[in-house]
Amino acid sequence: MISHPLKRRWLAVTIFVFGTAICSAQSQGGAPAGGAVDAAAKVRADAAKSREQANAQRDRMIAEYEALAKQLKDATEAQKKVILEKMQERKKAFEEAQNALHKQIRDEQRRQRQNTAPKR
């Protein structure tokens, strides 16, 4: 079963993907012209592709975690230490990836704010 914080993280990623798509579509201007419609369709396709990749990665992580949890249940003390180390390594890798994603989100938001700032 997925932990509650993990669900929140994936919800945050999903919201980011949709938010980026919406902000990008809004930055194209008011009424969509021919080029804006193509750009909006491209943004929707990119968002869908990102969502599919995120879901696939999430499913892989869940399957790996469940397999390790099952192994942990039936393991000896020495094996438990090894399995717990693997779980800690994967947790650390996940947190590093999450931090990189958050940095990317902040950078993208900053870039969008700069692009949409009123021109003087």
Image (cartoon, helix red, strand yellow):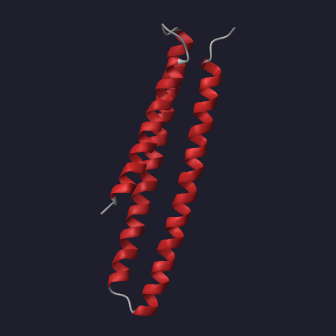
Determine whether 80 is above or below 33 in the image.
Answer: below
Q: In percent of the image, x 60 and y 26: which residue is there?
A: 112
> How many marks can you see?
0
Q: Which residue occupies the extreme left position in the image?
A: 1
Q: Nearer the viewer, residue 68 or 109?
A: 109
Q: Nearer the viewer, residue 49 or 120?
A: 120
- Coordinates of residue 89 in the picture (x, y in percent): 54, 71
Q: In percent of the image, x 65 and y 23: which residue is there?
A: 114
Determine whether 45 is above or below 35 in the image.
Answer: below
Q: Which residue occupies the extreme front position in the image?
A: 120
Quarter location, residue 70: bottom left
- Coordinates of residue 56 in the picture (x, y in percent): 43, 52
Quarter location, residue 80: bottom left
- Coordinates of residue 81 in the picture (x, y in percent): 47, 86
Q: Quadrant of the C terminus?
A: top right
Q: In percent of the image, x 50 and y 72: which residue is there?
A: 88
Q: In percent of the image, x 38 and y 55: which residue is there?
A: 5
Determine whether 54 is above or below 88 in the image.
Answer: above
Q: Which residue occupies the extreme right position in the image?
A: 120
Q: Is residue 2 left or right of residue 31?
A: left
- Coordinates of residue 105 in the picture (x, y in percent): 56, 39
Q: Quadrant of the N terminus?
A: bottom left
